[in-house]
Image (cartoon, rainbow, N blue to C red):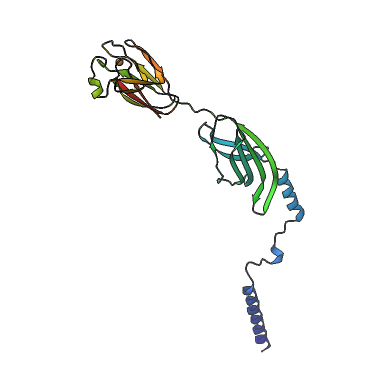
Amino acid sequence: MNFTYGLIAIVGLLVAASLVLISLDPQETPESNAIVIPETKIAQIEEDLNQLSVNPSLLPSITNVGDALVLEVEFRDDDGNIVDHVNYDIFASQDSDSILSDPAAHRHPGKYPVHESTTLTDSSIDITVVVQGLGHGDDIFGPKGVETAFTLTPVVAAQTATNTEIRTADNSGMSMDCQEYLDCYTPSVVTVSVGDVVTMINSDSTAAMHSFTAGTVDGFTPSPSGTFDTGIMSADDTFEWVPESTGEVPYYCLLHTWMQGTIIVE
Ligand SMILES: [Cu+2]
């Protein structure tokens, strides 16, 4: 009898204990298991972070005149190890004008901002990177307010100047027929770019003299514009002209005003 009462009492205690365990919030770790980092240790970690050197370097991908500067900023410690989670401000100016201002940027591993400026002139670019600590949100440690200055010089992208030839048509001085087919100059309309070389050739096989004279003709009355003028060219004479600005440049032959052409400069 006593034994049975004893069993019931033990079972009851076990059930009670189970209920207590179930009712415990699993989030609440018992005090005895908590990992406690001593305050001194945290202070030491913060101190180490504050001592950490965070050296920015620029990884520009474009520094061409006429393009925007596109760059990212990478950070390394004095031993050359990558430092991530860096908060920083970046500013760039050219000719004393601000061309880039990205305050409060943050470099994550594998996820970093790409900074883009306005269009570059050929003046040097002054770039300032200000390190504003490591970490996120309220937990920012490490060096703050450390400025590093950079200077970049935009390069003039290599231009591939094209050479375009315009020739005088055979017999174009003798007959106005070429006017009808618009091929007194061949080709009579060409499109070129600023900086290209336009070579004008008096290739007329009849050895007639011709000119390429910029301007227009009203009836038979020419109005030279002064943009270019080869003067009177003998057979096989050549003349080079490099357009400096965009626009349509009509031209004609001083000696045969029905000879007309247009150079379109883009
Ligand atoms: Cu001519």
Ligand 1 image-quadrant field: top left
Judge by depth and name the residue closer to the eye, 137 or 222. 222
Judge by depth and name the residue closer to the eye, 200 or 261. 261
Residue at the farthest bottom position: 1
- The answer to whether residue 127 shows anywhere in this view is yes
Residue at the farthest right position: 40
Q: Which residue is found at the position 70% from the left and 44% from the top? A: 143
Q: Which residue is found at the position 27% from the left and 22% from the top? A: 183
Q: In the figure, 150 relative to 164: above or below?
A: below
Drawn side of residue 217 relative to residue 193, left or right: left
Q: In the figure, 7 relative to 222: above or below?
A: below
Quarter of the view holding residue 185 = top left
Judge by depth and name the residue closer to the eye, 73 or 81. 73
The count of marks equals 0
- The answer to whether residue 82 shows anywhere in this view is no
What percent of the width, then of the height, locates residue 43? 75, 51
What percent of the width, then of the height, locates residue 161? 43, 24
For the C terminus, the quadrant is: top left
Q: In the figure, 145 relative to 233: above or below?
A: below
What percent of the width, then of the height, locates residue 83? 63, 43
Drawn side of residue 69 relative to residue 132, left or right: left
For the N terminus, the quadrant is: bottom right
Q: Which residue is found at the position 65% from the left and 79% from the top? A: 16
Q: Which residue is found at the position 60% from the left and 42% from the top? A: 101
Quarter of the view holding residue 34 = bottom right
What percent of the width, then of the height, locates residue 213? 36, 18
